[in-house]
Image: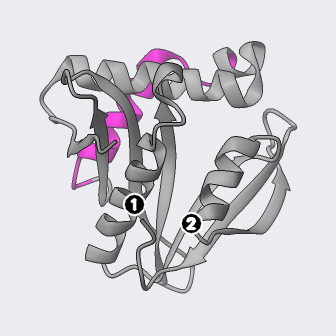
Amino acid sequence: MLHQIRPINPTDDAEIELVAIRMRDTLIEVEGEAIGMSLHDLDWLRARVRWHLDPAQSTATVLLAEDARGQIIGHTIVRVETDAHAVRSGLFATTYVVRESRRHGVAHQLLAAGEQWMVHQQLVEAATWTGATNHPLINLYGRHGYSIVAKHIHEVTKTGMVKLARTMGRVVI
C-alpha cells in the first residue's frame, strides 16, 4: 500500500510536537526507557526538529507519512552533512513508524523519499546511525543496499552504535 509522503508544515506546532514525541519514542525503543527518557527532554527535541527546518541552521527536510485517513503514521528527518574534507553526504537523523503501521511498507517509502531528496541535493553517500541491536532498522537499510561501515560506543549511553551507509546513484524502491 502506498502512503502519502509529504514535507512537514514548518509552521504547524502540532506536527512539530508529534515528531518530537516520536523522536523520544525512537530513543526509548532503541535504548530502553530509562536511557531513552534521559537523553533529551521534549523542549530539546522540539528545538531539534525546528533546527532541521531552519535553512540558516541546516540543509534538511522532515518528511511525514500519512495513512488513507490523513493520520501521520511516521516520519524521517534527513539532512546534509559535510565532513572535514568538504565532502557532502546525506544523513537519516531519525525515522519512526507507529507500531500499528509497521510491516506495511511505510519505512521503505520514507527511506526512498529521503534518498530521493538526497539525490536532488547531489549527495554522494547516504547514511544513518543506530543502536547495534536495532535489527529491524539494520535489516531495513540492508535491504536497500546499506552496510555497516563504522561502529562505536556512544559516549553518554555506553551502548554500541553502528553506521549504515551506501553510495548514492540509484534509488532502491
Residue linked to disc 1: 112
Tally of numbered tags: 2
In the rendered image, residue 171, in percent from the top left (x then y), is placed at: 41, 74
In the rendered image, residue 87, in percent from the top left (x then y), is placed at: 49, 84
Badge 2: few (under 14), some or many (20 or more) residues near its Cα, within 10 Å?
Answer: some
- Examine the image and state in which quarter residue 69 appears: top left
Residue linked to disc 2: 144
Q: Residue at x 64, y 69 (%)?
A: 146
Asked if 135 appears above or below 83 in the picture, the reply is above
Q: Amino acid at mark 2?
A: His
In the rendered image, residue 12, in percent from the top left (x then y), is placed at: 15, 24
Is label 1 in a helix, a strand or a loop? helix
Is label 2 in a helix, a strand or a loop? loop
Camera-side residue: 121 or 107? Answer: 107
Question: Residue 6: which numbered mark, if any?
Answer: none
**Is residue 65 toward the left or the right of residue 152 in the image?**
left
Q: Residue at x 33, y 58 (%)?
A: 113
Query: Does the rendering let one see residue 44?
Result: no
Q: Amino acid at mark 1?
A: Ala
In the rendered image, residue 169 lying in the magenta stretch gets the answer no
Give the CA distance from mark 1 to mark 2.
9 Å
Magenta-highlighted residues: 38-56
Residue farthest along the front direction in this orientation: 1
Magenta portion: prevailing SS class:
helix
In the rendered image, residue 47 lying in the magenta stretch gets the answer yes
Colouring convention used in this rendered image of the protein: one colour
Asked if 34 appears above or below 70 in the picture, the reply is above
- Examine the image and state in which quarter residue 145 appears: bottom right
Does the CB distance between marks 1 and 2 fall below 8 Å? yes
Q: Residue at x 55, y 86 (%)?
A: 85
